[in-house]
Structures are given as structure tokens and as C-alpha cells.
Amino acid sequence: MRFLPFLLLFVLFSCYEKSRDCKHYKTGEFYSEVTINNQLFKSTFKRDENIQVETYNNKVDSSQLRWINDCEVVFKTINPKNMAERKDIHLKILTTTDSSYTYEYSYVGETKKQKGIAYKVN
């Protein structure tokens, strides 16, 4: 009888699984929001299997994509204009809904990660 509360907790937590259907987000048009130091950054982007074109502050940036698996991708800027743009970015989709995904990203090899959310527009 004293194990009943533990069994109940185990059943509740084992039944709860965050959704992660990443294939739905490999292509399409998106709107993204990232908060860094209490400042909100917004961008829009179009993605196919190999290329992503992003618009941020009226600036267009293109990246080649290398998918590690359905939920992880590495971005390589096509025409980097400075040293920071030469660094590849690793993005991992953490959770998905029917119209958005939550992700974390960082420069390849760095441990500091940022989180954001992207919404599928089309």
C-alpha cells in the first residue's frame, strides 16, 4: 500500500512525453522569436532540405544545411562577411506542436546555448 503513491507518480511521468515530430519542420516558411538579455529578436525564413534564406532587420542571409538527423541541423553561411558568420551553427529541435517548434542553438563546439521558438507560416 505504501508503494501506491510511487507507482502513481511513475505512471503519470512515464505517460507524459513531449511531442517531437521534426520532419514537418525540415521545409517551409517560418517566423522565429529569440529572447537574449531580455531583448526580443524576430526573423522570417524559408527553408528547403539544403538551403535556408533568413531575413532579419531587412538583411537577407543564406545558409547551407546539413541535417544530422530529423531534429538536428548544422547551418553554414554561404557568403560570410566576417569571422562570426564563418562559424557554423548547430540547431536542435526540442519539442514540436502542430504549428511550431522550440529549439536550442549554439555555435558548433561552444557550450553556451540560446533557445527560441519558430512558427510555421506556410
Image: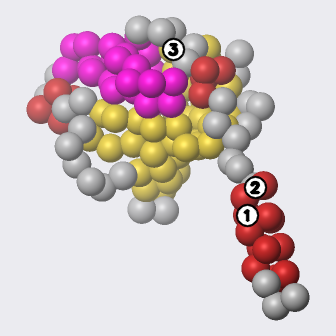
Crowdedness of circle 3 by 10 Å Cα count: few (<14), some, many (20+)?
A: some
For the point 64% across and 37% down, the residue is: 20
Q: In this rendering, is residue 37 above or below 5?
A: above
**Label 3 is placed on what type of residue?**
Arg
Name the residue beneath numbered marker 3. 47
Mark identifier at residue 13: 1
Is the residue under label 2 in contact with that under label 1 (CB below 8 Å)? yes
Which callout, 3 or 2, points at the residue further toward the start of the chain?
Answer: 2
Find the distance from the CA under tag 3 to the CA under tag 1: 35 Å
Which callout, 3 or 1, points at the residue further toward the start of the chain?
Answer: 1
Residue 61 in view here: no
Left or right: residue 92 versus residue 84 is right
Please tell me whether mark 1 sits on a helix, a strand or a loop: helix
Find the distance from the CA under tag 3 to the CA under tag 2: 31 Å
Left or right: residue 99 versus residue 74 is right
From the top left corner, tell me how far across and down residue 119 is, in percent: 66, 32
**Label 2 is placed on what type of residue?**
Tyr
From the top left corner, tell me how far across and down residue 83 is, in percent: 12, 32
Looking at this view, name the residue that lies furthest to the right: 1
Left or right: residue 107 versus residue 2 is left
Between circles 3 and 1, the one closer to the viewer is 1
Please tell me whether mark 2 sits on a helix, a strand or a loop: loop
Find the distance from the CA under tag 1 to the CA under tag 2: 5 Å
Q: What stretch is highlighted in magenta?
A: 51-80
Looking at this view, name the residue that lies furthest to the left: 83
